[in-house]
Image (cartoon, rainbow, N blue to C red):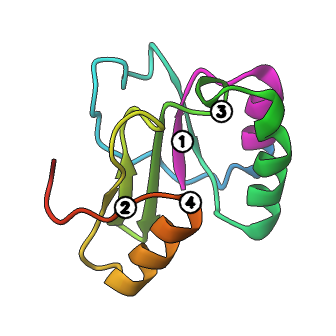
Amino acid sequence: MLLEGSPHPEIEALLTEAADGADYTAPAGTIWSWPQKEQRFSVRASSDLFARLAKAAPVHSEAEICSHLHFYRDQEALVQWFDAFSVPLLVSKAVAREVVETFASAVGGVVLDGAV
């Protein structure tokens, strides 16, 4: 999982602790996607990390957590979310539609085919 942004120091510490040492390979998607502007974190997705982020979320705005979020399987991009929380989340067709629909239903989202 790759996260980019200007996180709150508490979130930065959490992500730094969870760092997996892998290179940040997500593409730049906006003018702010520059290492000079925002921090980049490569972490291994885990239930523990998600639980810790969920615990921190009620007291931090989305921007204090991340502005861009990407999920990869090896070198394959599965999910890309530039300007996270304000624009559509892009999901690879390699992810089963049923999985996407279940996720969208759980978070109150909708599934749209094709780029918007």
Q: CA distance from mark 4 to mark 2?
A: 9 Å
Q: Which residue is mark 1?
A: 3
x and y percentages locating residue 109 in the rendered image:
44, 58
Amino acid type of the residue tagged 3 in the rendering: Ile
x and y percentages locating residue 79 in the rendered image:
38, 60
CB-based contact (under 8 Å), mark 2 and mark 1? no
Q: Quadrant of residue 56?
A: top right
Amino acid type of the residue tagged 2 in the rendering: Val
- Is residue 63 in view from this perspective? yes
Write down the region rendered in magenta: 1-16
In percent of the image, x 69 and y 49: which residue is there? 19
Res. 110 mark: 2
Q: Which residue is mark 3?
A: 65
Q: How many neighbours does mark 2 have within 10 angstroms: few (below 14), some (14-19), or many (20 or more)?
A: few
Q: CA distance from mark 4 to mark 1?
A: 19 Å
Q: How many neighbours does mark 3 have within 10 angstroms: few (below 14), some (14-19), or many (20 or more)?
A: many
